[in-house]
Image (cartoon, grey):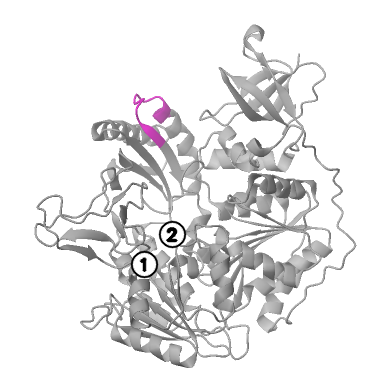
């Protein structure tokens, strides 16, 4: 009797054994349906063996072999094993991330016969010829075909990094290869796909991201897995797609934090993509105007090939002039100072477009009673409720709690309630009152919930039907609006007060990216930043358009503090209904970590337990323990043993997880 070892999407590390009924051709990588206790689950066969350590009479049979989804190939299984081991996640949960949405699959669906050979259509790239810098970078990437070669493609905003990607992609596809392009956000996929269609009209392109209808996502996944798709464009989940002809991987905006999954399997899409490129022996390109500090260090040490695009691709276009103005202005229009207001008026007179950037959605950050000092707080979190005027409610942006907007103070009955701070809705309303004839559009998570809403706004901007855009970081990257000549930044100083050691790095990337939206064509651009710190190193680097200067400042700080990229972190996060349960569990876990490091003579420091930066969220108390090591190898030897020790601790009401290489503290 043959035995299949099946990894199931449950929080256990080891696969489960099932016997294979006669006539069922089960192989490694196959998708099967089985029963676990009373539940019916889909799992992936990770091995087929002759015997099991479980008594034969206790084994259950495989219920069904799913033939509507192809078996995962060997390289994808190896990738899953790496992700499970490195990020300390159960293999079954990792494999579940790799599969398309199976609930939409009908039993009648069958795989179309696949021939991975490309069509006979020509594959040359269309579009403007590459400039000298672009051509040099593209040629280097193309010549690296067939070997693992990591590239950092650093180019100022508007320098034409996408054209380099597509030139390399055209050569890869012409050589019968498949291309995987990863983007940080779903909203960037429609316009990027149009760029691909314009440049490579004969390439068979599919998209993969979580907002696709389940049936479409399954079809696209199967086209990629069968070799029919030439190019896969997607978000971080696309990194796991089976690609039999993989020849090139591109990660656009590689610095973006969206590539790190923050719940479930906490993997980093960029780092997994690099590992996969090494595994498949193909080039991988990390593109950014503001590279992550980790990538910069690798490039400086020649671990990555460093290609630079130092100027904008369109000849007349130059980087925008940057001006700093006080953020505290007595004549401010709802947070918009007089200089920015005047600049907006000038652009309206010229018929040019403007962007007002504030990285806060909603109307106001909170609601304050001017009499007793009461503030609207979330009953489930240790955060404040955000005022949303359009729906007349107060919302928590952490747990989703919502309640009606109060008219009087619940503590003292005062009717004089003051909205604190500014959000996109408040700026949109103020600008509409000041510039009554202006066509104003707001872009944030609230305004783009409906399918096609974001694409519709982008099309109106391109058609010249929008005068002023008000938006969050959704507008900071990847968008090319030729008539947008002014960018105003409001509220940027908030990040400088953060206790997160990565906060200024993220702010720098955001400001350089949003500043790059201005003056991308033949019209000169201007950036006005409202700040109380015009002499801050970040402000000086932004004015000089010299990201590397500020990056060197940050690297010096990180080196002195032995923080990433000069050290490696892992964070144990835990939550429970009571603070006592969290503190007791984490204190024991911290001590278990120190004992493990001592027993194994590992150079890993485990810090005492502390509350999370948001101690209570969604009704649960939260805390964390951080482990620190200079060497990655020491951390990787430590983590499995620490996990085993944690699993042996009491604490049934505590939910916990390990975050390896966290982007910040919980």
Residue 556 appears in the figure = no
Measured from the top left, where is residue 569 in percent x and y? 42, 48
What residue sits right under mark 1 in the picture?
425
What residue sits right under mark 2 in the picture?
446
Residue 142's label in the rendered image is none
Quarter of the image for residue 302 reads bottom right
Circles 2 and 1, Cβ within 8 Å, touching? The answer is yes
The part of the chain drawn in magenta is: 645-656
- In the displayed structure, would residue 279 be above or below residue 196? above
Measured from the top left, where is residue 585 in percent x and y? 31, 31
Give the number of marks: 2
Describe residue 35's horizontal placement relative to residue 485 as left or right: right
Q: Mark 1 packing: few (<14 Cα in 10 Å), some, or many (20+)?
A: many
Describe residue 342's horizontal placement relative to residue 370 as left or right: right
Does label 2 or label 1 sit earlier along the sequence?
1
Residue at (34% x, 24% y) in the render: 650
């Amino acid at each position: 009797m043959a035995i299949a070892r099946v990894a199931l999407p449950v929080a256990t590390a080891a696969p489960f054994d099932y016997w294979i009924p006669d006539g069922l051709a089960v192989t490694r990588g196959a998708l099967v349906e089985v029963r676990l206790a009373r539940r019916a689950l889909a799992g992936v066969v990770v091995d087929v063996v002759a015997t099991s350590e479980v008594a034969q009479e206790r084994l259950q049979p495989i219920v069904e072999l799913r033939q509507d989804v192809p078996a995962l190939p060997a390289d994808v299984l190896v990738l899953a094993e790496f992700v499970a081991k490195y990020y300390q996640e159960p293999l079954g949960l990792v494999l579940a991330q790799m599969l398309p949405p199976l609930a939409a699959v009908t039993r009648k669906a069958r795989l179309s016969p696949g021939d991975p050979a490309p069509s006979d259509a020509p594959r040359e790239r269309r579009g403007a010829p590459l400039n000298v810098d672009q051509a040099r970078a593209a040629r280097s990437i193309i010549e690296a075909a067939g070997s693992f070669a990591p590239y950092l493609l650093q180019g100022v905003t508007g320098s034409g990094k996408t054209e380099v990607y597509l030139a390399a992609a055209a050569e890869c596809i012409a050589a019968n290869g498949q291309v995987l392009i990863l983007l940080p956000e779903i909203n960037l996929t429609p316009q990027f796909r149009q760029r691909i269609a314009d440049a490579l009209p004969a390439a068979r392109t599919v998209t993969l991201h979580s907002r696709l209808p389940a049936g479409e996502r399954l079809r696209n996944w199967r086209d990629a897995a069968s070799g029919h798709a030439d190019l896969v464009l997607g978000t971080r989940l696309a990194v796991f797609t089976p690609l039999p002809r993989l020849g090139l991987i591109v990660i656009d905006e590689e610095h973006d934090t969206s590539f790190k999954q923050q719940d479930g399997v906490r993997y980093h899409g960029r780092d997994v993509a690099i590992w996969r490129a090494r595994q498949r022996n193909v080039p991988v390109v990390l593109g950014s105007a503001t590279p992550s500090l980790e990538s910069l260090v690798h490039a400086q040490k020649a671990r990555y090939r460093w290609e630079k695009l130092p100027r904008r691709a369109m000849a007349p276009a130059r980087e925008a002039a940057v001006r700093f103005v006080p953020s505290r202005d007595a004549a401010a229009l709802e947070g918009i100072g007089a200089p920015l207001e005047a600049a907006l008026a000038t652009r309206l007179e010229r018929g040019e477009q403007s962007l007002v950037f504030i990285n806060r959605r909603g109307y106001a950050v909170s609601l304050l009673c001017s009499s007793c000092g009461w503030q609207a707080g979330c009953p489930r979190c240790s955060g404040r409720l955000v005022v949303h005027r359009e729906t007349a409610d107060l919302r928590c942006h952490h747990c989703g709690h919502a309640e009606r907007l109060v008219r009087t103070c619940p503590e003292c009955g005062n009717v004089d309630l003051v909205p604190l701070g500014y959000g996109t809705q408040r700026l949109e309303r103020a600008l509409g009152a000041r510039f009554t004839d202006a066509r104003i559009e707001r872009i944030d998570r609230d305004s783009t919930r409906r399918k096609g809403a974001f694409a519709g706004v982008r099309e109106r901007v391109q058609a010249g039907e929008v005068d002023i855009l008000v938006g969050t970081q959704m507008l900071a990257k990847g968008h090319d609006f030729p008539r947008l000549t002014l960018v105003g930044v409001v509220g940027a100083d908030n990040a400088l007060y953060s206790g997160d050691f990565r906060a200024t790095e993220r702010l720098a990337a955001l400001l350089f990216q949003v500043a790059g939206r201005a003056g991308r064509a033949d019209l000169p651009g201007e950036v006005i930043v409202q700040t109380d710190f015009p002499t801050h190193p970040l402000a000086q680097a932004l004015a000089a358009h010299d990201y590397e200067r500020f990056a060197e400042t940050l690297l010096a700080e990180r080196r002195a503090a032995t923080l990433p990229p000069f050290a490696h972190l892992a964070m144990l996060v835990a939550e429970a209904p009571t603070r006592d349960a969290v503190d007791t569990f984490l204190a024991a876990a911290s001590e278990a970590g120190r004992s493990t490091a001592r027993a194994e003579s590992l150079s890993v420091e485990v810090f005492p337990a502390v509350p999370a930066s948001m101690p209570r969220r969604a009704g649960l108390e939260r805390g964390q323990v951080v482990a620190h090591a200079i060497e990655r190898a020491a951390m990787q030897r430590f983590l499995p043993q620490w996990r085993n020790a944690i699993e042996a601790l009491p604490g049934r009401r505590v939910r916990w997880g390990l975050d390896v290489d966290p982007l910040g503290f919980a």
